[in-house]
Amino acid sequence: MNRDEANQALELIRRVVSQARDDSALQNWGVIWMLHGFTNAAGFAGTQWLWTGGHRTPQAYVVLWALVLGFNIVTIFLLKRGQTAGARSFIERQIWAIWSTFVGGMVLVAICNWLLGLDRLFMPAMSCVLFATAFSMMGALMGRVWFAVAAFFAVMALVMTRLPDHAYGLLAGLWLVVQCGGGLALHRARLRRLASQRPEARLV
């Protein structure tokens, strides 16, 4: 492969990745993220309320988050029903993998916190570490702006260790702003793409 052929191959790869991002934006992910920003924030706020109220057994937390996650999963499929993206592809599969792994990590951290029998939660700080990791992987896929979000949550992980009694309330506010803000950006990208309706050759 000579230099010109290599440059053409790189340009094709860039176009495929750009198309995958644009096609993902055409779906309702922005609306989904904004909705889930409120539901997840409500879950964190509910966790803070339960913890402040002296609940130290897992049953109430399991019920709370089963409701939140169940609602989130149902609304994803409802809001994406009938929508197609030309490249449901590497990009979208990786996003599903990132956030499914994140949820699994959160559940595992909660179980570890309970099994250790700690008198204070280390989970809020670890949640921020997991958020930072997930957004860092998003940055590699979707653009460098997500690295800034990852750095923000890395710093907040340290802040959480100084506010253990109010950490989940703080996390509720942070997540509401971050997820709704990210959702708004995705929704605006979708509206811009739909307004342009520019014809283009499909690469995948």
Image: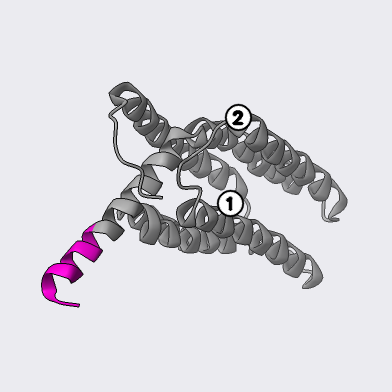
Q: Quadrant of the N terminus?
A: bottom left
The residue mark sitting in front, 1 or 2, is 2
* Residue that label 1 marks: 167
Q: Residues within 10 Å of mark 1 (few under 14, many from 20)?
A: many
* Residue that label 2 marks: 82
Q: Nearer the viewer, residue 143 or 106?
A: 143
Helix, strand or loop at mark 2: loop
- Horizontal arrangement in the rendering, residue 96 relative to residue 158 (left or right): right
- Using the rendered image of the protein, determine whether residue 43 is visible from the camera's viewpoint: yes
Residue 49, located in which quarter of the rendered image? Answer: top right
- Horizontal arrangement in the rendering, residue 130 relative to residue 109 (left or right): left
Percent coordinates x, y for residue 187 in the rendering: 42, 30
* Residue type for callout 1: Ala
Mark earlier in primary sequence (1, 2): 2
Span colored in magenta: 1-11
Q: Main secondary structure of the magenta part?
A: helix
Percent coordinates x, y for residue 186 in the rendering: 41, 36
- Using the rendered image of the protein, determine whether residue 163 is visible from the camera's viewpoint: no
Percent coordinates x, y for residue 13 in the rendering: 30, 60
Task: Report if residue 181 lies within the magenta region.
Answer: no
Q: Residue furthest bottom?
A: 1
- Horizontal arrangement in the rendering, residue 152 relative to residue 30 (left or right): left
Q: Nearer the viewer, residue 112 or 4?
A: 4
Compared with 115, 73 (above or below) is: above
Compared with 30, 194 (above or below) is: above
* Residue at mark 1 to residue at mark 2: CA–CA distance: 39 Å
* Residue type for callout 2: Gly
Percent coordinates x, y for residue 76 in the rendering: 63, 37
- Which residue sits at x=72%, y=46%? 52
